Amino acid sequence: MKCLVTGAAGFIGSSLSERLIKEGHEVRGIDCFVPYYPKACKLENLAALRDSAAFEFFEEDLNQTDLSVRLRDIEWVFHQAAQAGVRASWGDTFESYVQHNILATQRLLEAAKSCPTLKKFVCASSSSIYGDAEVFPTAESQLPRPVSPYGVTKLAAEHLAVLYASGFGVPTVSLRYFTVYGPRQRPDMAFHRFIKAGFCHQPITLYGDGEQSRDFTFITDALEANLLAAVHGEPGQVFNVGGGSVISVNHVIELLRRHFPDLQVTYLERQAGDARHTSADISRAKSLLGYAPKVAIEEGLEREIEWLRSVAA
Ligand SMILES: NC(=O)c1ccc[n+]([C@@H]2O[C@H](COP(=O)([O-])OP(=O)(O)OC[C@H]3O[C@@H](n4cnc5c(N)ncnc54)[C@H](O)[C@@H]3O)[C@@H](O)[C@H]2O)c1
């Protein structure tokens, strides 16, 4: 298939591009290197892809480029581009979230309406659309009530995807990722920061009491969900993509102490926008897509540690 991956230089987008190429697909990648974290990390993410004849890359903003040209001959779209980060989404920076998460998505969907070759449009949504859910594990049918501006923009983007499916037949499928981790994880994300602190013998700074829990999803499981959605997803569907490892952050730290026995923690005040718990009910993805996460937290953490050791060397 000819695929368009937006956010192709990011954590998930670059990993997905590599996976698609490994499976024999062709990838056109777009990324504008939003300055949320260093461009150098994203260039590193792209390093292996640049050598592949099946990969072409455009350093462009979805809000500015001619998307009908970029969508030419495309059969699968994987829309991963976004302004990520929950805590940074309050205040003046909100504008960037609106631009990259809502306006860019609407522009891409609008262009996708007139793409005759398009077979599937897979959208990256987020568990943050649930906010502090009332029921755990949380099913897609629960009322989304984000507790961060980031979550609000991701929910708006997801609603747009559903709307363009029902209104114009754009074959969108949205995946609500639950905290994805593993090699290339963004430097602002908890595991990345914790492991780096472990290497440097520095204390971890943790927001809240550490009893908040997350459904952690290993990157290869998230990638598998994208491929399954492209093949089996029906237009307008929305799926939770969890990893099946729901544990507290304090428990994660205990696991990390197996690798870094002297790891210390400085507890800071809980931040506005952080949900207390997340837990995905993945029965819909299981039954309709055949999704079954494979990587448990212990193994996934080790693989992220190995990756960070290799990039630090
Ligand atoms: N990582 C997670 O745990 C997680 C959880 C839930 C949802 N998500 C979603 O998954 C997707 C990928 O997340 P990630 O962790 O890989 O983030 P990331 O920041 O590493 O990747 C996103 C990429 O999109 C690019 N981008 C942003 N706006 C763009 C635009 N207008 N035009 C072109 N490129 C643009 C950025 O430069 C960045 O490289 C995002 O949509 C995010 O909201 C991620």
Image (cartoon, rainbow, N blue to C red):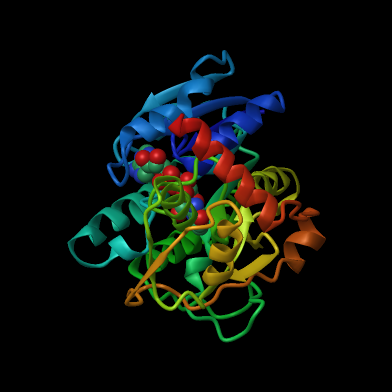
Q: Say which residue appears at 53% left-offset and 64% top-offset.
A: 253
Pick out the residue farthest to the bottom: 134
Q: Position of residue 136 (x, y in %)?
A: 64, 80
- The residue closer to the viewer here, 290 or 161, is 290
Q: Residue 70 placed where, x, y %?
A: 45, 28
Q: Quadrant of the N terminus?
A: top right
Q: Position of residue 257 (x, y in %)?
A: 56, 59
**Is residue 130 visible to the viewer in this orientation of the structure?**
yes
Residue 242: image x %, image y %? 65, 61
Q: For the point 48% across and 78% down, which residue is it?
A: 276
- Determine which quarter of the picture holds residue 283: bottom right
Foreground residue, 311 or 93?
311
Q: Which one is in front, 266 or 27?
A: 266
- Visible residue check, residue 167: no
**Image position of 210 with respect to 103: above or below:** below
Residue reaching furthest to the front: 262
